[in-house]
Image (tube, grey):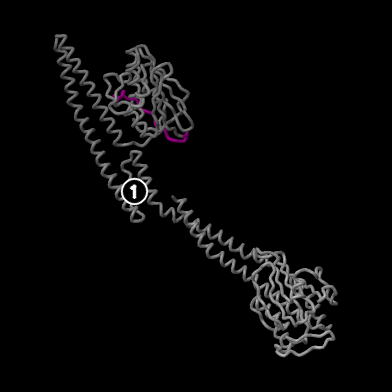
Amino acid sequence: MIRRLIVSYVALVGVALAAFTVPVAFTLTSQLRGDTEESVLREATTMALLLGDGDAPAREALARMAGAYADETPGTVEVATADGRSAMPPLPLTARPHDAAFGDALERGRTTVDWGSRFVWGPELVITVPAYARGEVTGGAEDDDGGATESGDGDGDREGETGAAAGGTTGGTGEAAGETGAAAGGTVEADDADDGGQAVGSAGPTDRIVGAVRVRYATADLTDRLWRIWGFRAILAVGVLAVAAGLGAIVARLLTKPLRQLNDMASRFGDGDLTARSPVTGPQETRTLARTLNQGAERLDTLVASQRIFVADASHQLRTPLTALRLSLDNIADGVDDEFVREDVEQATAEVVRMSRLVSGLLVLARAEAKVSAPEPLALRELVEERLKVWRPAADERGVTIVLTGDADDRARVLAGAGNLDQVLDNVLSNALEVSPDRGTITVRVETGGPEEAVLEVLDQGPGMSAAEQARAFDRFWRGQGLTGRSGSGLGLAIVKQLVTDDGGTVTLRDAPGGGLCVRIGLRTVGDGTRWISPRPGAPRSGG
């Protein structure tokens, strides 16, 4: 969920950033292109006016202006005469005097602008401007002898128009082309239909064209400026998105913190910790949900605690009358000579014993569920040896041998609650001894299962259990004939699983090699520097 929130936030910022910066970048690119075209066209128009004067001083001024233009800008100037062949000293002749742009300028008096590409621009900007003879009047016609006739409706003095064109300030491509047309005394047509090469203006049919001026302006500097425009905004966008991602992560974690707390509470609750509660924080919805869950957990904890208290109290209260009943039956059996009566008393005594074991198992299980003690480091092999010493006398009565094997040494230490591992061993050994045949063998194996686990296995030679029975063996009050016989309470393995699970371990059942049942108990180990506690011997304890 956090990832989705961050992605959504960054995507939203990215869309807003693109909607703002991309149009601005396009506008700046268009402005850069327009300003450059206007400036180059103005310079080319001024040079065309000088070329149209026709006298030597004007041409020398044109040559000096072209040289200075080439030195100070990335542009070069080319000129051509009206015939397209003869040079106009001291200016050089263009390399291609017969191309289409010069043809439009010399034949039709059209100014052309060629950016070299429809996508932004090419390697150079080429502007070709026609030059008209000075001193003529718009609308007049020049005869073969050089005489001029007056125009009946002329547009004014040519010198005045030239001065206006040379000294005027243009605002765009169309206006600059208009200056060129005004300088020639003709009409101007603005055409923006073709970015690659556009005809900017044309002269009237009575103007005499004496040549054309072409300016080639390299666009490398424009490309660098274009990269700076777009690159700066790209870097800025990446930086803004990175900051947005960081802020999004912080905001997302703050928004989802109440949900994570609820999830932690649910996980602890699912693991059996009924005291888990969630802080009531965050928005109104999560606060309401947290309060509802806490109230439900509180009621459930109260109900379970009441049930455990009832079971513990009932078990504790039943132990005294059962003990008294067994003593009474023992006294009756001692004072009765009738064999039939004695047999009935012995059966009653066996049932009382079974009920006593059941009550004891319930009491142990209730205490195990009610409180989980903190695990402590214990020496595993030493504890197993102590419990085997307690159980060997009972095994010797039936001729059963208990063998301790395994590669774990005395340094192997495990984490277990105080007294938990003792009860686990007592229940497992009690079941193994009950199902083992006379003169059989019970194998207790202590091994190292990995860097963080020690394994305790108890193998018997009894009838074993089927897969279905192994799946149900840890259920309360379930008794398998092969495991606990008729005297078991069905709580022994349930107590084993509860205690081992409380200590963070695992317990499983599987078939033993050669027949019988193998109870495998996995326990957490501790490092060499952890303080450990030696086990204290005690009497056998079994929950049935």
Residue 121 position by quadrant: bottom right
Q: Closest to the observer: 354 or 412?
A: 354
Place of residue 266 in the rendered image (x, y in percent of width and height, measured from the top left): 35, 44
Place of residue 316 in the rendered image (x, y in percent of width and height, measured from the top left): 21, 30
Location of residue 538 with respect to 166 vertically, above or below: above
Residue 390 position by quadrant: top left
Location of residue 255 with respect to 497 vertically, above or below: below
* Three-letter code, disc 1: Ser
* Residue 538 shown in magenta: yes
Location of residue 301 with respect to 110 vertically, above or below: above
Q: Closest to the observer: 177 or 19?
A: 177
Q: Is residue 420 left or right of residue 29?
A: left
Q: Is residue 237 left or right of residue 373?
A: right
Q: Which residues are magenta?
A: 527-544
Place of residue 29 in the rendered image (x, y in percent of width and height, measured from the top left): 62, 68
Residue 18 position by quadrant: bottom right
Q: Closest to the observer: 78 or 208?
A: 208
Q: Is residue 367 left or right of residue 445?
A: left
- Counting every numbered tag in the picture gives 1
**Magenta span: helix, strand or loop, mainly?**
loop
Q: Residue at (34%, 52%) from the top-left corner?
A: 286
Instruction: Write down the residue under mark 1.
Output: 278
Q: Is residue 344 left or right of residue 403?
A: left
* Residue 459 shown in magenta: no
Place of residue 491 in the rendered image (x, y in percent of width and height, measured from the top left): 29, 27
The quadrant the C terminus occupies is top left
Looking at the rendered structure, the secondary structure element under dot 1 is: loop
Q: Bin the neighbour count of mark 1 within 10 Å (Cα to Cα): few under 14, some 14-19, many 20 and up.
A: many
